[in-house]
Amino acid sequence: MSSKIWVINIVLMAVVAFFSVKAYDVWSEGKKLISESGSIKKPLPWPEKKIPKKRLHPESDYTVIVSNNLFNNDRLERPPQKQEEGKKPEPTGRVSRQALKLAEWSYKNTNLYGVIIVGDHREALIGEVPASAGKGVGERGVKHARVGDTVGRFKVKEIKDTSVLLTAVGREWRVSLFDKDKPKKRALLKKETGPVVIVGGSKTKSVLTDAKAVGKRPTPKPAVSKKKTLPKAQNKKRTIPVPTDRSRTRKR
């Protein structure tokens, strides 16, 4: 029994000795790490950038500014320069008289019905006279045109608030919105419902008015007079009942 106790004690002493050696090794390694971390070099500071000094100009360079003082009482305002009036471009090359007459005819029959200006957007409502048509032909419709568009024989060059500038055959014509010499055609007012029939150019007739006029005419009398005929009186026949049994009839 005593031998077993001694064996157990020896084993325990061996275990204690083993763990104590391991603990010493761990402690000694931690001390080495601390000493190594202390020997790490600190980062060097950032080098300061040297700002180069600006070179000052000599005072002679500022003599012009000093002599022309903006706040000097003797300073006079420069008179405004007269703007040269824009000259109309001269027609290039020879223009036939017939083409010029046709252009003038189209100009006289061209009307400006309205101008649309929204910001930078400019648009004009111009009556279009066909370029292929000759004299005696008026407007065939209203066209929405911008700068650079072609309307009949003309090309739109400029759009203003109350006028447009048209060019053709090397010349320019200005069409105004309010032009007394060019009375604009008024649209027909449809007071009555129904289609409008155009007869003989400017004369207009309404189908509904013709129908009303026909309805107001007196109705013609019929050729054969219609007389009221009374129904014929029907002859009412009196029915006498017939006895069923003859033996029962009495002799008078």
Image (tube, helix red, strand yellow):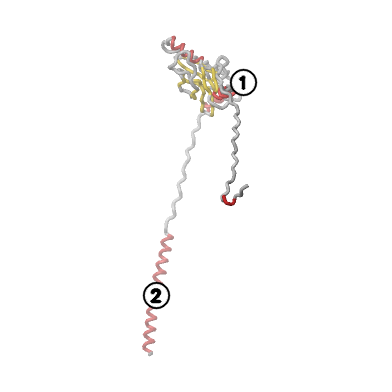
Residue type, label 2: Phe
- Regarding residue 68, the answer to whether it shows in the image is no
The answer to whether residue 32 is above or below residue 223 is below
The residue at the far top in this view is 97
The answer to whether residue 97 is above or below residue 64 is above
Residue type, label 1: Asp
The answer to whether residue 220 is above or below residue 29 is above
Q: Residue at x 40, y 72 (%)?
A: 24
Left of 37 or right of it: where is 236?
right
According to the picture, the residue beneath numbered tag 2 turns out to be 19
How packed mark 1 is, by other alpha carbons closer than 10 Å (few <14, some 14-19, many 20 or more), is few
Q: Residue at x 42, y 56 (%)?
A: 41
Sequence-wise, the earlier of marks 2 and 1 is 2
Q: Residue at x 61, y 25 (%)?
A: 71
The image shows a total of numbered marks equal to 2
C-alpha separation, residue under disc 2 versus residue under disc 1: 105 Å
According to the picture, the residue beneath numbered tag 1 turns out to be 74
Give coordinates of residue 81: x percent, y percent: 55, 17
Q: Secondary structure at mark 2?
A: helix
Q: Residue at x 38, y 78 (%)?
A: 15
* Nearest to the observer: residue 127 or residue 251: 251
Q: Which label was assigned to residue 196?
A: none
* Nearest to the observer: residue 179 or residue 229: 229
Give coordinates of residue 185: x percent, y percent: 55, 19
Q: Secondary structure at mark 1?
A: loop
* Nearest to the observer: residue 72 or residue 175: 175
Q: Quadrant of residue 11?
A: bottom left
Give coordinates of residue 36: x percent, y percent: 41, 61
- Regarding residue 119, the answer to whether it shows in the image is yes
